[in-house]
Image (cartoon, helix red, strand yellow):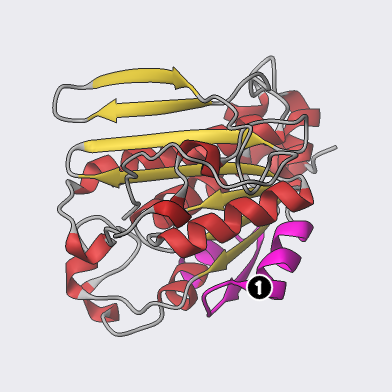
């Protein structure tokens, strides 16, 4: 159960009938891996830290740039040139002294990515390149870890939750077969409205807390699409690609191509 200090600190959350003290205790004991400390990662990590997630691991190899500031709101102009992950870790520790934050100052891949994913309860993908997104998805499938992913470009956002720990389910590659794309769109090459990125990052935090407390719908995953210009949401079911090279039994290459949206 929670301590007296935690009870007071998280009173508004644990007062929810479907959370309670046991739910808050689960949040406080949880371990979340956040890959990427840009607009999505800063927004998601702030609310996960505020909610009391006991162990947060953040990973990124980038430094703060002037163009980051409109949407990566944990950083200030006096921190330009500093490490994003180190700066964000300090911010989160000051925000909530009740949690443990570990910073990984590198791009996760290979064995270290697999290790970090295996240790986490939930993985939050806040990255901005297709190679890392594909690797995170594969690591989550192989380690049967829940994956919360989001992206934003222009006025639009998207978000999905994959419960690999619960049942055989479509994966992110079923939705976007990244290895079949001839070209890639990078964060630095795309326009975006800052609050859209923040909304998607906060939404990732919300969905992560629902996964941790067992309140998330574990049925077929959906692609949530946000139209920021018109303020509209749309939900689409994600179908399993029986030829997916990551999650299908056949491990064959998929043949359906889509246009991905990359996170900022």
Q: Secondary structure at mark 1?
A: helix
Q: Is residue 121 visible?
A: no
Q: Locate residue 59, reporting x and y percent.
A: 54, 69
- Residue found at x 29% / y 85%: 81
Say which of 162 and 124 sits in front.
162
Say which of 171 and 253 sits in front.
253
Q: Locate residue 90, reporting x and y percent.
A: 50, 72
Say which of 201 and 219 sits in front.
219
Q: Does 170 sit left or right of 179 as displayed?
A: right
Q: Quadrant of residue 51?
A: top right
Is 96 a magenta residue? yes
Q: Residue furthest right?
A: 1
Q: Quadrant of residue 213?
A: top right
Say which of 8 and 47 sits in front.
47
Which residue position holds label 1? 110
- Residue found at x 37% / y 45%: 151
Q: Does 212 sit left or right of 174 as displayed?
A: right
Magenta region, residue range: 90-119
For residue 49, above or below residue 4? below
| Quadrant containing the N terminus in the rendered view | top right
Q: Locate residue 25, reporting x and y percent.
A: 78, 38
Is 179 a magenta residue? no
Q: Residues within 10 Å of mark 1 (few under 14, many from 20)?
A: few
Q: Is residue 17 visible?
A: yes
- Residue found at x 72% / y 46%: 145
């Amino acid at each position: 159960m929670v301590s007296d200090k935690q009870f007071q600190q998280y009173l508004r959350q644990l007062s929810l009938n479907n959370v309670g003290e046991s739910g808050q205790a689960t949040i406080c004991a949880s371990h979340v891996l956040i890959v990427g400390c840009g607009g999505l990662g800063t927004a998601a990590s702030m609310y996960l830290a505020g909610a009391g997630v006991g162990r947060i691991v953040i990973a990124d190899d980038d430094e703060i740039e002037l163009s980051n500031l409109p949407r990566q709101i944990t950083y200030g102009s006096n921190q330009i040139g500093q490490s994003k992950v180190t700066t964000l870790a300090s911010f989160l520790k000051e925000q909530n002294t009740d949690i443990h934050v570990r910073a990984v100052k590198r791009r996760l891949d290979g064995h270290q990515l697999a290790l970090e994913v295996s240790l986490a309860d939930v993985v939050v993908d806040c990255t901005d390149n297709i190679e890392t997104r594909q690797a995170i998805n594969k690591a989550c499938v192989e380690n049967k870890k829940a994956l919360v992913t989001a992206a934003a470009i222009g006025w639009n956002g998207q978000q999905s939750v994959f419960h690999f720990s619960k049942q055989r389910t479509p994966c992110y590659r079923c939705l976007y077969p990244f290895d079949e794309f001839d070209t890639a769109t990078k964060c630095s090459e795309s326009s975006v409205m800052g609050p859209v990125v923040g909304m998607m990052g906060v939404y990732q935090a919300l969905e992560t807390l629902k996964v941790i407390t067992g309140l998330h719908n574990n049925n077929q995953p959906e692609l949530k699409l946000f139209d920021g210009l018109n303020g509209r949401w749309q939900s689409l079911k994600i179908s399993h690609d029986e030829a997916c090279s990551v999650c299908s039994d056949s491990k064959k290459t998929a043949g359906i191509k889509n246009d991905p949206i990359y996170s900022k």
